[in-house]
Image (tube, helix red, strand yellow):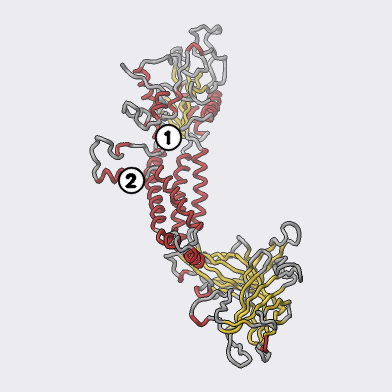
């Protein structure tokens, strides 16, 4: 006994793959490939099951390739890449902050060696992260290339001919007209082209299709991901980044020796540093003076004079936050600001040993800063021996006042500055060859200057005041001149432009794949037994949507204006009168035998996808009503389709 497969049956078996429970191939698999470039789930290359012959080397390679280029593996790799980036954000990274890495190792004696073996201190250059990165790259390429060729083939092809029974499609309308079939087809093709459908006449009907940009957006999204991966790789391999603190009046040349700190990618060559220089003329800052945002910066600019090349003309530029100076592929960002108090150090004979402006590092948003003043050469003690001097310095631009708590600044502008100093003498340890932090004082080989009570000599100075060292050892004076400094980051990122373009393309492609619907429309005009032309229109989308019937209704209304409904032949319609102008199925659409159902399904293979085959129409011919003398046809979704 023959078996008839209904849309409900196909919905049940469709979740099991491309084969139903009897093992027969899904009859609509070929049709679904025509509206999408998604790769088919071909089980021919899958791993062998129980009782099946073992795969050879080529078979296993093919199976591995199919798994690698599948969507589920690509999503899994993307998830692993995201998870792998988490320790790179939480754990200090070598090349970014070596001091924090060393502090972490010293503090965590158990986790430190473990993290070192796992490569967690250099996540983005580790073997396991690179493996995920490369596998994702290969997976995307292996998925995109065949889909691209398939999509190009679809662009070069034409929409398939209409199935024999248009009533089985989700959106359908029909009416009778006195226009000839050729006139109807020509008018339909003209209207469809005006609405940017690709159309042609085939098999006695007009076939049209629209929405190719949906798959183009999908492919663009995946290609943009590859561009992002390439841009990220190029940015990591060829980038350079360095920092420089510059005081007002000082300058910088873009050479390696001028940087305070510098790091670069493994393929970067220092000869590729762009030749330019700039000088910090002045720093301009203004701040909110009242309200809840007291002290918030309102103006934050570094006015510089720069020149490109060795002998380029000088130009003026104001560098602001997020508004860098761009010179020959390099960007100069303003990232910090502070004060550099000027002090004059004299020996016991009153001779000026050194007059310097010392930059101090801010420790809060109000400008409170700390640092060290180091006098390396030129100082002799009271016995005439060479010594080095060191002062721990604490600076506030706006002092709260005596007896008003600890010494912290009340405002970031220098309204009432104070400089607190504590004095040492001896050896600073700079001759040992071990690098030192210029903002910290190493007192291990130094001796305290003591006050009259035998305590560490220290004093809070106003502008113009002097701290005298005991026993005629000299003095240090807080001068009126208060300079400002700014820190700059000089970056060279060759892949940033490509990364931005890839991100924009990915967003545009994703939007296209989500909001553009691929759909098809067929128009068939045939001469009836009474000599009157019967017009049928049907629409089909890649997924069920109310927009398909709406669009088909608009097209039918336009076509109806050029091929209006024919008047009724009999003013008193009987049960056997002319066919109605509106119907969702032919009068012969009664329940069919298994053989006729199979034939109809086969005819619809060129258009209907498995998900859309659920919209089979089984209407009762007795439910049809006669049409008005000259109605505009309405689109009536077939039974089971989305309304």
Residue 443, x across and y down, in percent: 57, 78
Disc 1 designates what residue? 35
Count residues near mark 2 (Cα–Cα under 10 Å), then give few for <14, some for 14-19, many for 20+. some
C-alpha separation, residue under disc 1 versus residue under disc 2: 25 Å
- Can you tell which quarter of the image residue 440 is in? bottom right
- The answer to whether residue 325 is left or right of residue 166 is right
The mark found on residue 65 in the picture is 2
**Is residue 30 among what the camera can see?**
no
- The answer to whether residue 516 is left or right of residue 294 is left
Residue 190, x across and y down, in percent: 50, 30
- Residue drawn 53% across and 23% down? 635
Count residues near mark 1 (Cα–Cα under 10 Å), then give few for <14, some for 14-19, many for 20+. many
Q: Is residue 288 above or below residue 219?
A: below
User: Which residue is nearer to you in this view: 370 or 538?
Assistant: 370
The residue sitting at the front extreme is 453
Q: Is residue 475 above or below residue 544?
A: below
- The answer to whether residue 432 is left or right of residue 382 is left
User: Which residue is nearer to you in this view: 260 or 519?
Assistant: 260
Residue 540, x across and y down, in percent: 47, 29
User: Which residue is nearer to you in this view: 608 or 301?
Assistant: 301
User: Which residue is nearer to you in this view: 627 or 355?
Assistant: 355
Query: Which badge, 1 or 2, is on the more N-terminal residue?
Result: 1
Front: mark 1 or 2: 2
The kind of secondary structure element at disc 1 is loop
Locate the N terminus and report the quarter of the image it occupies. Answer: top left
The kind of secondary structure element at disc 2 is helix
The mark found on residue 314 in the picture is none
Residue 325, x across and y down, in percent: 58, 65
Q: Is residue 105 above or below residue 570?
A: below
Q: Is residue 177 above or below residue 311?
A: above
């Amino acid at each position: 006994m023959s078996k008839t497969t209904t849309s409900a049956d196909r919905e049940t078996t469709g979740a099991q793959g491309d084969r139903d429970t009897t093992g027969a191939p899904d009859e609509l698999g070929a049709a679904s490939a025509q509206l999408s470039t998604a790769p088919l789930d071909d089980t021919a290359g899958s791993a062998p099951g129980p009782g099946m012959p073992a795969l050879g080397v080529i078979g296993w390679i093919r199976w591995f390739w199919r798994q690698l280029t599948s969507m589920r593996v690509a999503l899994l790799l993307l998830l692993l890449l995201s998870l792998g980036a988490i320790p790179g954000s939480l754990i200090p990274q070598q090349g970014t902050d070596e001091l924090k890495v060393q502090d972490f190792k010293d503090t965590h004696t158990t986790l430190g060696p473990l993290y070192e073996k796992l490569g967690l201190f250099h996540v983005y250059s580790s073997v396991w992260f690179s493996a995920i990165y490369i596998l994702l790259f290969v997976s995307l390429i292996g998925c995109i290339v065949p889909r691209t060729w398939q999509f190009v083939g679809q662009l070069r092809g034409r929409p398939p001919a209409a199935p024999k029974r248009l009533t089985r499609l989700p959106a359908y309308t029909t009416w009778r007209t006195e226009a000839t079939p050729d006139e109807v087809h020509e008018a339909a093709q003209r209207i469809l082209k005006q609405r940017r459908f690709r159309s042609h006449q085939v098999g006695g009907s007009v076939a049209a299709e629209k929405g190719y940009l949906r798959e183009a957006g999908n492919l663009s999204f995946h290609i943009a991901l590859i561009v992002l991966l390439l841009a990220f790789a190029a940015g990591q391999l060829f980038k350079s980044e360095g920092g420089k603190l510059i005081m007002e009046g000082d300058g910088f040349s873009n050479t390696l020796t001028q940087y305070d700190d510098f790091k670069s990618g493994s393929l970067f060559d220092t000869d590729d540093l762009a030749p330019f220089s700039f000088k910090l003329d002045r720093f301009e800052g203004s701040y909110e003076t009242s309200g809840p945002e007291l002290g918030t910066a309102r103006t934050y600019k570094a006015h510089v004079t720069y020149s490109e090349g060795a002998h380029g003309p000088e130009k003026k530029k104001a560098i602001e936050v997020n508004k860098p100076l761009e010179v020959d592929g390099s960007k100069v960002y303003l990232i910090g600001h502070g004060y550099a108090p000027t002090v004059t150090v004299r020996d016991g004979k009153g001779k000026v040993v050194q007059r310097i402006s010392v930059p101090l590092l801010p420790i809060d948003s109000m400008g409170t800063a700390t640092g060290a003043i180091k006098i390396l050469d030129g100082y002799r003690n009271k016995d005439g021996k060479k010594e080095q001097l060191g002062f721990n310095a604490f600076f506030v631009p706006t002092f709260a006042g005596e007896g008003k708590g600890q010494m912290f600044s009340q405002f970031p502008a220098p309204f009432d500055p104070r400089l607190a100093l504590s004095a040492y003498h001896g050896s600073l340890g700079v001759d040992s060859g071990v690098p030192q932090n210029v903002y910290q004082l190493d007192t291990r080989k130094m001796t305290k200057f003591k006050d009259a009570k035998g305590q560490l000599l220290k004093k809070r100075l106003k502008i113009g005041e002097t701290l005298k060292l005991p026993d005629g050892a000299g003095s240090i004076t807080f001068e009126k001149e208060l300079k400002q400094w700014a820190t700059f980051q000089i970056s060279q990122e060759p892949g940033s432009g490509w990364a931005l373009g890839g991100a924009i393309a990915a967003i545009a492609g994703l939007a296209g794949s989500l909001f553009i619907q691929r759909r098809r429309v067929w128009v068939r005009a045939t001469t009836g037994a009474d000599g009157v032309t019967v017009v049928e229109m049907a629409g089909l989308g890649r997924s069920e949507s109310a927009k398909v019937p709406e669009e088909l209704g608009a097209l039918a209304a336009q076509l109806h204006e050029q091929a209006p409904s024919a008047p009724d032949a009999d003013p008193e319609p009987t049960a056997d009168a002319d066919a109605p102008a509106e119907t969702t199925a032919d009068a012969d659409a009664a329940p069919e035998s298994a053989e006729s159902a199979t034939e109809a399904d086969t005819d619809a293979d060129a258009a209907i996808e498995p998900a859309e085959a659920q919209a089979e129409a089984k209407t009762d011919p007795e439910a049809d009503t006669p049409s008005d003398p000259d109605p505009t046809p309405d689109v009536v979704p077939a039974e089971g389709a989305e309304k």
